[in-house]
Image (tube, rainbow, N blue to C red):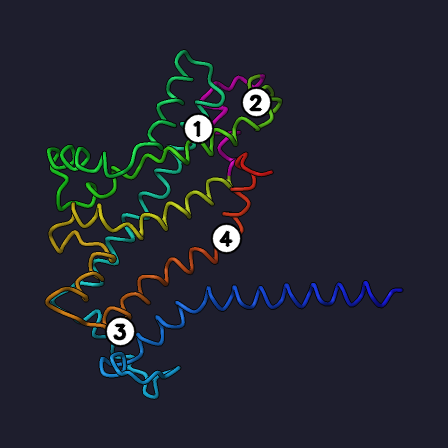
């Protein structure tokens, strides 16, 4: 009688292991192909014969990537790093402050402000793209990094997540802070903000990834090569006039490495932040 349940558990563990292996393979396959192609030459990439790994690894593809005079890949990576490093913490802190105000501070019109924030989530980005470009262009933001950064500092979805988080925050802790003479700003700065570390880390990491991968807005604003981000620099390797597949894949490996590191470091905080945002069960 005890053999049958044991066999059932073993079958379930085997099925879960096979499913996990398939999902892991599907997840890692693009990274394998990217690294394989980055270490091949142009002839190998266009050859009809499939090879699992290049017989001769061409590490010079990476040195040529940064030595290319037509595309300053080093500068583009620096621009992307600056844009993401500014956008992630600033947008996260702004969303945190706005979410706390909407959740805790009883001011007239709070419901109307919340409704407007929710309404912005329903407006397609294509509708606001041209007006945003006109405003930023009239302020002299074309071919500048601040023109790329500023429009992405407000994240309405993050505001709603922080609002849900602060609505669940124990009011007894705030009452203890009030007894110590803290106002709304002091309560937020000394109690609420330090207690939302998981949310700050998770949304900050997601904001960093989103800023790093942004393409269309930096393409329109950064028309001069000095304002190109890494994604714009990558697009120059594959155009109607030029096709540089080794450079394209080498650049893809270089540009995706910071995101992989970011995800590996912050994955625990991302899961924990979503779990405490009010969206669970």
Q: Earlier in the sequence, mark 1 or mark 3?
A: 3
- Residue topped by disc 4: 267
Apparent side of residue 138 relative to residue 166 in the rendered image (left or right): left
Cβ atoms under marks 2 and 1 closer than 8 Å: no
The crowd level at tag 1 (other Cα within 10 Å; few <14, some 14-19, many 20+) is many
Q: CA distance from mark 4 to mark 1?
A: 23 Å
The crowd level at tag 4 (other Cα within 10 Å; few <14, some 14-19, many 20+) is some
Q: CA distance from mark 1 to mark 3?
A: 44 Å
Residue 214, given in percent of the width and then of the height, sits at 28, 49
Helix, strand or loop at label 1? It is: helix
Q: In front: 189, or 96?
A: 96
Q: Is residue 184 above or below residue 252?
A: above
- Residue topped by disc 2: 174
Q: Is residue 217 above or below residue 106?
A: below
Q: Residue at x 34, y 38 (%)?
A: 90
Q: In front: 117, or 212?
A: 117
Q: CA distance from mark 4 to mark 3?
A: 28 Å
Identify the magenta region: 179-196
- Residue topped by disc 1: 99
Apparent side of residue 84 relative to residue 277 in the rendered image (left or right): left
Q: Residue at x 21, y 38 (%)?
A: 129
In which image quadrant can residue 21 be found?
bottom right
Frontmost of labels 2 and 4 is 4
Helix, strand or loop at label 3? It is: helix
The crowd level at tag 3 (other Cα within 10 Å; few <14, some 14-19, many 20+) is some
Q: Earlier in the sequence, mark 2 or mark 1?
A: 1
Q: Earlier in the sequence, mark 4 or mark 1?
A: 1
- Residue topped by disc 3: 62
């Amino acid at each position: 009688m005890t053999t049958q349940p044991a066999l059932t558990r073993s079958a379930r563990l085997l099925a879960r292991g096979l499913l996990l292996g398939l999902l892991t393979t599907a997840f890692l396959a693009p990274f394998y192909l990217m690294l394989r192609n980055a270490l091949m030459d142009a002839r190998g990439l266009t050859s009809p014969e499939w090879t699992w790994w290049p017989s001769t690894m061409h590490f010079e593809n990476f040195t040529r990537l940064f030595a290319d005079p037509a595309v300053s890949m080093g500068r583009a990576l620096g621009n992307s790093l600056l844009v993401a490093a500014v956008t992630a913490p600033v947008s996260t802190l702004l969303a945190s402050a706005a979410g706390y105000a909407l959740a805790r501070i009883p001011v007239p019109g709070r419901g109307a402000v919340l409704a407007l924030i929710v309404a912005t989530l329903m407006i397609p980005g294509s509708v606001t793209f041209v007006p945003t470009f006109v405003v930023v262009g009239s302020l002299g933001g074309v071919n500048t990094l601040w023109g790329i950064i500023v429009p992405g500092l407000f994240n309405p979805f993050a505001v709603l997540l922080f609002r849900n988080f602060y609505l669940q925050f124990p009011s007894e802790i705030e009452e203890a802070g009030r007894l110590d003479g803290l106002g709304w700003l002091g309560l937020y700065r000394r109690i609420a903000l330090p207690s939302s570390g998981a949310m700050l880390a998770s949304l900050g990491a997601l904001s960093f990834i989103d800023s790093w991968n942004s393409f269309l807005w930096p393409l329109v604003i950064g028309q001069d090569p000095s304002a190109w981000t890494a994604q714009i620099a990558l697009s120059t390797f594959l155009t109607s006039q030029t096709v540089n597949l080794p450079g394209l894949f080498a650049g893809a490996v270089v540009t995706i490495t910071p995101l992989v590191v970011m995800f590996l470091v912050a994955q625990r905080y991302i899961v924990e932040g979503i779990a405490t945002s009010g969206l669970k069960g």
